[in-house]
Amino acid sequence: MPFGMGVGELVLILVIVTVVFGATKLPQLGDGLGRAIKNFKRSVGSLNEIEVTPRVPSVSEKKSDQAGGSATTAGSSATAASQERPAK
């Protein structure tokens, strides 16, 4: 049995949960717990969804930086950085 518990202990826990929450709330609790586990597994499985690598400037940004356009590059970099953040 899981965690070294026997059938008697599991039945006792089930009786206590039934008394505390009532028989009508048990299906709702099970549904909520199942959805929580499903969402947790989905979020763990999608680790590549958020990009955390630093952004490398492109060739055109390097050229404009060397040409003295650092003010426009800084503004566009800030705009690009804000666009790369995931929406919360």
Image (cartoon, rainbow, N blue to C red):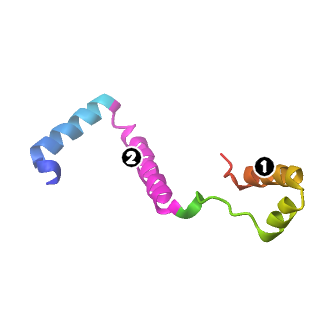
- Would residue 46 be counted in the magenta stretch? yes
Question: Residue 18, position in %: x, y?
Answer: 28, 35
Would residue 34 be counted in the magenta stretch? yes
The dominant secondary structure in magenta is: helix
Q: Give percent across and percent down for residue 70.
A: 85, 53
Q: Which residues are magenta?
A: 21-47
Label 2 – label 1 distance at C-alpha: 46 Å
Q: Quadrant of the rendered structure where residue 57 is?
A: bottom right
Front one among 68 and 13:
68
- Residue 31: image x %, image y %? 43, 48
The residue that label 1 is drawn on is 78
The residue to which callout 2 is attached is 30
Q: Is residue 81 above or below residue 8?
A: below
- For the point 78% across and 55% down, the residue is 80
Q: Foreground: 64 or 41?
A: 64
Q: Mark 1 falls on what kind of element?
A: helix
Q: Amino acid at mark 1?
A: Ala
